[in-house]
Every structure is written in structure tokens, then in C-alpha cells.
Amino acid sequence: MTEKLQKVLARAGKGSRREIETLISQGRVSVDGNVAHLGDRVTGKEQIRVDGHMVETQPEGDIICRVLAYHKPEGEVSTRKDPEGRPTVFDRLPKLQGSRWVAVGRLDVNTSGLLLFTTDGELANRLMHPRHEIDREYAVRVFGEVNEAMLQRLRKGVMLEDGMAKFDTIKYNGGEGMNHWFHVTLKEGRNREVRRLWESQEMQVSRLIRVRYGKIELPRNLPRGGWSEMPLDQVNYLRNEVGLTNEEQSKVDVHATERYKQVAQIRKAVRKHNSRVKGEGAGAGAAAKKPAPARARSTGQRQKRKTRL
């Protein structure tokens, strides 16, 4: 049985089918040493290379579809590597063997909140395609006076540089002074679309947080920089939304009392990661400071310390 080459590469996390078709047309993909062409089909036993690098492929039935919910903090970029050396959303994710995490869309560097990752490139590709119209909800803090005429225009639609855009819903969520919070939803994921819509009304967005993707909400006690793996029912909800068959296996323990890592463990991992990143930055051109010598404690002091613990 054969499959289209771009489908096999999408499943391996090498990009969307459209992106892979571009790679093929540019002559950057080879099969068994021969330059691939659009329309080629493979069995999966061939040696497939992209830009000269071997791609590890697996039959569709052998791959377990896994999905992570990641609480992206501000300051991280949604790419695997950043030429400016900024932290990326992939830095903290758990390591995989035989597959890789594929981001479902992007959040810009100044936006925080819910970002999904999956091991199934086809699922990621379909979730990102606008024809499936999966709504996203954002909490937005804007600076300035907002009037009803602005809100009506944002609901009806305004012309941006890349076409018409609008919010499907807008709900006021309180504020103080000139800062006002709104919850907005839309069914597209164009670059900086939420910010550009508000800017079209001469409003400045000072905070932007994605709080929901479809029916998947950002877990309330998931700290920034932490991730949680979704249980099978949520994975299949996403698959059903885009016309894929149900996944039958999961890495999540269905008998566990917690649906994701203990919050304390996540916070510890986040602190450890932040400490390592800061240490690497400080270590360039400067000698690491030696820890101060520990002061000797008397037996009485040690006993008091033990009592307090």
C-alpha cells in the first residue's frame, strides 16, 4: 500500500502538506537518492531525505496521536530555532523518540496563553486550516476609551491589509481607569489578527492571552511555561472536529487521580529551566560566582531548624 509523499512527511512533522509540496517542487526532497516530484507515492520503506537529512517515518497505524496543552509565556517565539537566540516554545517540551512535536498554529512573542502541540502532523495541518472554523478565544486588555460604534465595526468586519476580518463575539470583562478587558472569539489564525483588529480602531493592546481553542480551555492551575498532556477524550474531540478517526491509545494514565503533572512538579521544572537559561546567559564572558561557604551551626540551631520544618 502506498501513500502520497507529502502525507508521509506531514505525519513525520516536517510541515503542512502545502509546505511539503513547496519543498518537493524546489527539489529539496529525495526518495532513495532520486529527486522527488509532486505526485510521488511511497510505501514508507524508502530512504526519504529533506535537505539531505534522513527522515524517520512510521506507518500511520503505528503512531499514537498525542496532544499537549502548553501555557506559553510572553517572550518566547513560536519557532524551533531563533536566529536572535530568544527562547522558543519548543525548549521546555518533553523529548520524544521516533517523532516530534508539531505546533498547532503560532502565538506571537508578546502573546501568552494556550498553545497546542501534537505528534500527528496531519492533525496539526487540519486544525490550522481555516475551512474547519475552530474558534479561538482571547482575553484582551486594551488601553483607551472603547465605544459601542467601535465594537459594532469589529463585529461586522473591518478591512485589514490581508482582507476582511472580524470578531465573532466580544464580551466586556471589566477594567480600571483606561485599561479595559474584553474576551473575543474568532475562527481564523492570521498573523497578529487580534491586535490588528483593535489597532484598526486606534486602540492599543497591552495584554493578549489565548484562553481557549475550540472546547479546550487553558487549565487554570497550569503555570506559565508548563505543559499537560491531554487525555484520550480531548484528543478525539480535536480529531473529530477535523474529520479524522478516533485514536485508540493514549500515554495518559486513565486511572491517575490527576489529569496532568502535579502543579508543584511543573513549577519546579519551569524554575529549573529558567535558572538554566539565565545561567547560560550570565556564563558568557563572566566567571560563575562561587557559592558562599556554609556557616557552621550549633547543635541547638540545627534542632531549632528541624523543629520549624
Image (spheres, grey):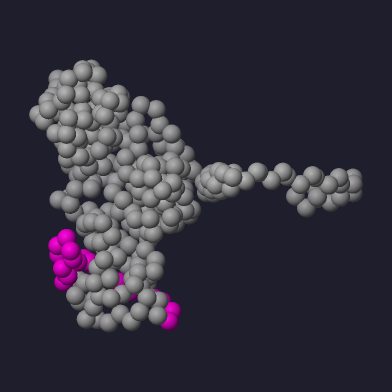
Query: Residue at image x 18%, y 64%?
Result: 161
Above or below residue 148? Residue 246 is above
For the question of whether residue 218 can be seen, the reply is: no
Query: Residue at image x 78%, y 53%?
Result: 308
**Nearest to the observer: residue 211 or residue 52:** 52
Query: Residue at image x 39%, y 69%?
Result: 206
Q: Which residues are magenta?
A: 156-177
Above or below residue 162? Residue 44 is above
**Nearest to the observer: residue 22 or residue 9:** 22
Picture coordinates of residue 151 (x, y %)? 24, 76
Picture coordinates of residue 117 (x, y %)? 34, 43
Among the 4 quarters of the image, the one containing residue 52: top left
**Magenta stretch: includes residue 172:** yes
Above or below residue 142? Residue 117 is above
Among the 4 quarters of the image, the one containing residue 296: top right
Picture coordinates of residue 72 (x, y %)? 41, 52
Most common SS among magenta residues: strand
For the question of whether residue 13 can be seen, the reply is: yes
